[in-house]
Each structure stands twice: as structure tokens, then as C-alpha cells.
Image (cartoon, grey):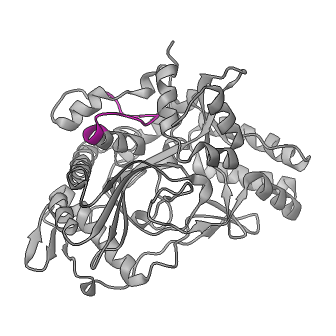
């Protein structure tokens, strides 16, 4: 049996999107004890509780109008908009009447093909390509003026905001130096003439820079899984546990189909030492493409999880670490050049792949296996390099998938332990257990 994975793009695939401060912004961290940069935990509130508060303060009709407007700002495809928009009023009515809110919003895979066309409407450009830079590892050479994230009010409802929060525990100078470092990494990956200097040594590749830092820094690399905090909603300073839900179409023994929060995956490089401190994340993001991102130590909600499928430590796993950064660098150059040459919108996001695909390429190269679902890349038209060889061997879930095989990858894409999942999203835990899935 094969289930057709027909696409959801603006919501499900936009789960890999970067919000707020651009390359300095993402959602990563840890709710299960796995080290992912020791982020602070943002206070959180359930979507049901947030809606109850909003309804009490503003009235059900005003909340409905605001959510309809918010959904319309996120979805431009009429089919996808209609599918999600139809869920708004029943959800608000359920909460207003004292009922239990089901997963909301749910995006079925069946609407994904219509969303693909959105990416053909804009011309591609590389917003992450500043002029070549000359970066000095010495932190005393950097400015102390980083890009900081902040929340933006959602008009129509008092107390409702969207965006990302920074962890104030990382100081301006450290964050600014990390952000400049990431600009250099992205330039090095493209071979644009960028250089990185450490004392008397000058480097022109990402691998050489990281190899240099391995001699003086503690470096931890993790293959992380998260639930995507795409909506990024806050109510009175508390993160709303509001993932975008995806209906996989996989049948459950009790009836219905498996519905899970949309996933996100990336590789984190955590640096601690005399010069570079903080976390650098790598993945393919909406609009900005495939690149390294400066994270610092972000504040993020526990509900989005943060579990490492693999962890590599400096000293014992240097070869793996260098393989990760080398593959990431090659993938950035390949997909960025292809997006520019073909003028692909969104820097190829949703066309060449998404965040899960960028992580899957690295995982296959370093571990010889794939534990991520779903993958959005097409099969390569020709084999021109080792990345094409990897992509040709990975599943192309958009063309259809075997539910039995996919279940295992759905499980290993979970960003938290079963115990944590039971606390955060008990329905998901129950459905996963009914399929005898573990990770």
C-alpha cells in the first residue's frame, strides 16, 4: 500500500521558516535533558487556555475575526486557505462552549500540490549573500551591536503577539561576534573570497575553520529534531503551544489517521572557548535558503522539544564533525547556486527540498541512514556529484510513501521522549503507542 503525499507548503513546509531576526533567529533547545545549547525555557500556555483567555477578554467573534485575518496573512493559496480557514469558527465555538479543543490547525497532505505553485510566482534571490568578508576569530575585533529578536503585536487582540524571544543571558558582544562568524561561514561555503583569520593563520573553507577551532574550543555537534514553532504565538508573554498539525493519512488501529505536529530538523554546532561562544545551526529555511544561522542561546518553549538523534563531541568525534560541516558547506553552495541559476523562488525552498532534506543529506553522508520524515526533494535529473547520489537514494515522500516504512521515520523525527510527549501532546503519544512506535 502506498499513500500519496501530495503537498502542504505554506504551513507544513514553512515549518522550516526563519522568523524575527533573520539569520540570527530560529527555535532550538531541549525538553528532555539532551544538550542543545542549554537554552532558557520560555513560559508556555496551551492553545486552549490561550483561546479561553482571548475569548473572555475580547469575545468569540473578535477572536474569530483576528484568527481568520492571521491565517490569511500566512496562506496565499486559496485551497490551503479554505482548508484551514474552515477550522477556525468550529474551534473557537468548541472552546467558548467549554469543550476540548482538538488538534488545530490541521493541514492535510492532500492540499500540498496546489501550494507548490506558489513558489513559481516569485523570482529567486539570495538575501543571505553579503559582500565577501574578512573575519577575525579574535572577539576583541568585533562590534557589540547584534541583531536582536522581538515580538510583534497581532492587531485586533490585546496580549497576542508573534515572533521569537532572545535569551538575555547572552551578551551583545558575544552574540554580535557569533553573527559575524556565521556571515563568514556562509561566505566561505560559497567560495566568494571570504577569509577567516586566527592569529597568523588564514582559512578559506568552513572545514579548515572548524578544524582550527577544534584545537582550542569545545565543540558539540547535534542532529536535532524539533516541533516547528511556525506560528510563533505568544499571549501575555507566554508561548502558546500552537504547532501546525499535519494529517499523515496513515490509518490508526482505532480508526482515523495519524496527526502529528509539523517537524523541523537541523544540525547545531555548539562552540565554547576563548573566541567563539554560542550555537550555529544549519538547515534549509524559507526565503533565505540553505545556510548557517547564528543562534546564540535562544529562549524557546518546551513544547517544541529538542532531541538529538546523534551527538558528536570534539576530541573523540572530530572526523564526524568535519564531515558534517563539509557536507553542509557543499550543500549550501550547490542548492544556492542552483536556486540562483534557475531563479527559483524562496531560494529553492520547497522545490529543491526543505529543512528535513538538508538534514537528511548530512545524516546519510555521516551515518549512512535516514531517520527523517517527510522529505520533499525531487529525484535528481542527473548525478553530478555525491550530493545527487545521496538524494537519489533518499525517499521522495512527495511522490508517495509506504506507511509501514514511513512510521519508523515519523517516530525518529519526534523531538522529545515518549514521557515528555505524553505531557505536552497526550493525543500524539496515544496514537504513536497504538502503532507500537518507539524511538
Up-down relation of residue 179 to residue 337 (above or below): below
Main secondary structure of the magenta stretch: loop
Q: Residue furthest left?
A: 200
Q: 4 or 76, which is in the foreground? A: 4
Q: Is residue 82 in sight in this rendering? A: no
Q: Is residue 378 magenta?
A: yes
430 drawn magenta: no
Residue at the spot 86% in from the left edge and 44% down from the top edge: 93
Q: Residue at x 50, y 31 (%)?
A: 7
Residue 432: x and y, percent?
62, 32
Residue at image position (28%, 83%) is 142
Find the residue positioned furthest to the top: 1
**Position above or below: 434 against 120:** above
> In the image, residue 383 lies at what x, y percent?
18, 29
Question: Which residue lies most toward the bottom here?
Answer: 140
Give residue 251's quadrant in the image. top right
Where in the figure is residue 178, as x and y percent of width and height? 33, 73
Image position of 179 with respect to 348: above or below: below
Q: Is residue 108 above or below residue 168?
A: above
- The residue closer to the viewer here, 29 or 289, is 29
What is the total number of numbered labels drawn onto the structure image? 0
- The residue range painted magenta reads 364-379
Q: Horizontally, is 356 left or right of 416 in the view?
A: left
Residue occupying the point 37% across, 83% down = 173
Amino acid at each position: 500500500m502506498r499513500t500519496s503525499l501530495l503537498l502542504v507548503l505554506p504551513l507544513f513546509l514553512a515549518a522550516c521558516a526563519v522568523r524575527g531576526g533573520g539569520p540570527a533567529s530560529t527555535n532550538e533547545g531541549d525538553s528532555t535533558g539532551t544538550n542543545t545549547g542549554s537554552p532558557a525555557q520560555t513560559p508556555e500556555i496551551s492553545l486552549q487556555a490561550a483561546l479561553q483567555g482571548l475569548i473572555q477578554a475580547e469575545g468569540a467573534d473578535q477572536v474569530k475575526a483576528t484568527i481568520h485575518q492571521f491565517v490569511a496573512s500566512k496562506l496565499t493559496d486559496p485551497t490551503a486557505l479554505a482548508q484551514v480557514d474552515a477550522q477556525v469558527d468550529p474551534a473557537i465555538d468548541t472552546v467558548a462552549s467549554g469543550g476540548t479543543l482538538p488538534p488545530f490547525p490541521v493541514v492535510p497532505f492532500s492540499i500540498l500540490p496546489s501550494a507548490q505553485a506558489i513558489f513559481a510566482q516569485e523570482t529567486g534571490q539570495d538575501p543571505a549573500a553579503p559582500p565577501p568578508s574578512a573575519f577575525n576569530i579574535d572577539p576583541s575585533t568585533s562590534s557589540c551591536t547584534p541583531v536582536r529578536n522581538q515580538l510583534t503585536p497581532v492587531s485586533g487582540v490585546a496580549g497576542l503577539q508573534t515572533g521569537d524571544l532572545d535569551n538575555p543571558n547572552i551578551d551583545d558582544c558575544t552574540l554580535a561576534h557569533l553573527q559575524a562568524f556565521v556571515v563568514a561561514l556562509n561566505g566561505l561555503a560559497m567560495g566568494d573570497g571570504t577569509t577567516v583569520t586566527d592569529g597568523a593563520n588564514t582559512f578559506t573553507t568552513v572545514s579548515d575553520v572548524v578544524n582550527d577551532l577544534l584545537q582550542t574550543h569545545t565543540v558539540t555537534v547535534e542532529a536535532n529534531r524539533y516541533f516547528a514553532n511556525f506560528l510563533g504565538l505568544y499571549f501575555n508573554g507566554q508561548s502558546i503551544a500552537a504547532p501546525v498539525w499535519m494529517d499523515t493519512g496513515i490509518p490508526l488501529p482505532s480508526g482515523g489517521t495519524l496527526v502529528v505536529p509539523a517537524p523541523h530538523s537541523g544540525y547545531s554546532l555548539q562552540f565554547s572557548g576563548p573566541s567563539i561562544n554560542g550555537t550555529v545551526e544549519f538547515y534549509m529555511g524559507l526565503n533565505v535558503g540553505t545556510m548557517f544561522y547564528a543562534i546564540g542561546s535562544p529562549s524557546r518553549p518546551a513544547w517544541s522539544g529538542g532531541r538529538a538523534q546523534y551527538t558528536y563531541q570534539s576530541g573523540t568525534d572530530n572526523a564526524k564533525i568535519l564531515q558534517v560541516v563539509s557536507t553542509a558547506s557543499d550543500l549550501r553552495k550547490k542548492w544556492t547556486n542552483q536556486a540562483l541559476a534557475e531563479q527559483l523562488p524562496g531560494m529553492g525552498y520547497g522545490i529543491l527540498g526543505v529543512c528535513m532534506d538538508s538534514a537528511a543529506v548530512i545524516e546519510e553522508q555521516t551515518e549512512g541512514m535516514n531517520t527523517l520524515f517527510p522529505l520533499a526533494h525531487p529525484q535528481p535529473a542527473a548525478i553530478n556529484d555525491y550530493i545527487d547520489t545521496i538524494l537519489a537514494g533518499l525517499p521522495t515522500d512527495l511522490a508517495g510513501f509506504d506507511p509501514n516504512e514511513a512510521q519508523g521515520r515519523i517516530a525518529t523525527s519526534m523531538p522529545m521522549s515518549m514521557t515528555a510527549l505524553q505531557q505536552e501532546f497526550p493525543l500524539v503519544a496515544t496514537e504513536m503507542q497504538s502503532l507500537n512506535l518507539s524511538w
